[in-house]
Amino acid sequence: MHDGRFDPGGFYEFNLTGGMIRTRNGERVVVLSEDVLSSLVAAAARDGDLTPLRRLGELLGEQVLASLDRPASVLSAEAVLGHVSAVTALFGWGRLAFERWGSALVVALRDKPELDEDELGAAALLGGMFSEISQRQVSCVPTGDSKFIMVDFEVAETVWGWFKDGADLPAIVGMLETKRAS
Amino acid sequence: MTDREDRLRSLLDKVRAKRPGERETHAAEAVDRIRAGSGTVAATAEATPLSEPSTSPEIESPTRYSSQPPRVERPLSVEPRAQSAQPPSRPAVAVSPSRRPAPIRPQSVAPTGQPVVYATDQPEFPRPKTFGELLELTLALRPR
């Protein structure tokens, strides 16, 4: 890490003799083709258990936290985005960006692998990653066009239902309001 | 040698020519005339011998200093401290208990030891929210 920026140099360690790939933090990773991963994610989505993908997102979040010199909560959104997008790209999950829709924080993940039609695999991955980064229970609910709204896990099912009923992102944001926890 | 010196020398010779006894006779006669002249002068000389210094008892007496005026022996607590602490140039103001002192004008009193720039609020500029603040906002969203 240099000047608060993510340093991708030496992120992977290829051990050709041992047949292993590790990250610089020691995490062993496996390279999969998009087709294979897609079929695995589709099966998990049908079974309703996307825990492995959420766990993969948590591993990505650990990589992000390891690259930060301070907690993500005190950093600017731009600084956190730089590290998150770098780690996401290094794992081949596409281009990540932040958007603000009123009080809602929206994650846009472009050029991601085509996994499942409802994008629940990517939602689980992002939810796990941002939960690890923020140390909070965060859910990223698909809202179409490769965008995911970040909400509390308690309202995730409700927002998902709105989207399934045809509401787009502006309509979903309009149906939410800020309520402080008492 | 000038004429003036000649006259002085002749006068000196005349004086030297007189006998010493004659000079003593003249002196004794002068003393007798003084003694016979004025009695007040003789009495004064006898009452105040020169060997005794004419000292004043008021100055040399230590008792004068031991007997201080009564105000010195009063306890100090009787003295009003507030009046003695006031500077002489500041007149004492009689203030009734129900009347409060006049307020101090702000422009006449600067905070001591504190720069004026810190006494005023800093101008606030829009500060970009941190990632944590953005996260708090989005996690606080609830259905209407």
Image: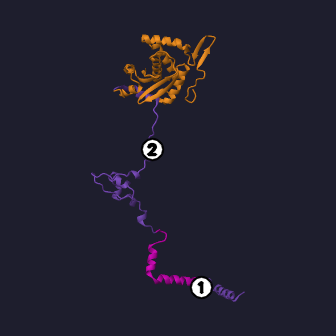
N-terminal label among 1 and 2: 1
Q: Secondary structure at mark 1?
A: helix
In the rendering, at what x and y percent does residue A10 appear?
Answer: 60, 21
What shade does chain B have? purple
Q: In front: B7, or A58?
A: A58
**Quadrant where the C terminus of chain B lies?**
top left
In the rendering, at what x and y percent does residue A109 appear?
Answer: 49, 23
In the rendering, at what x and y percent does residue A142 appear?
Answer: 43, 21
Secondary structure, magenta segment, majority class: helix
Please, which residue is most extreme toward the right here?
A: B1
Q: Which residues are magenta?
A: B24-53
Disc 1 crowd rating (10 Å Cα; few below 14, some 14-19, many 20+) is few
State the residue position of label 1: B22
For residue B118, the mark is 2
Judge whether A131 appears above or below B17 on screen: above
Picture quadrant of residue B9: bottom right
Residue B107 visible in the snapshot? yes
Q: Amino acid at mark 1?
A: Glu
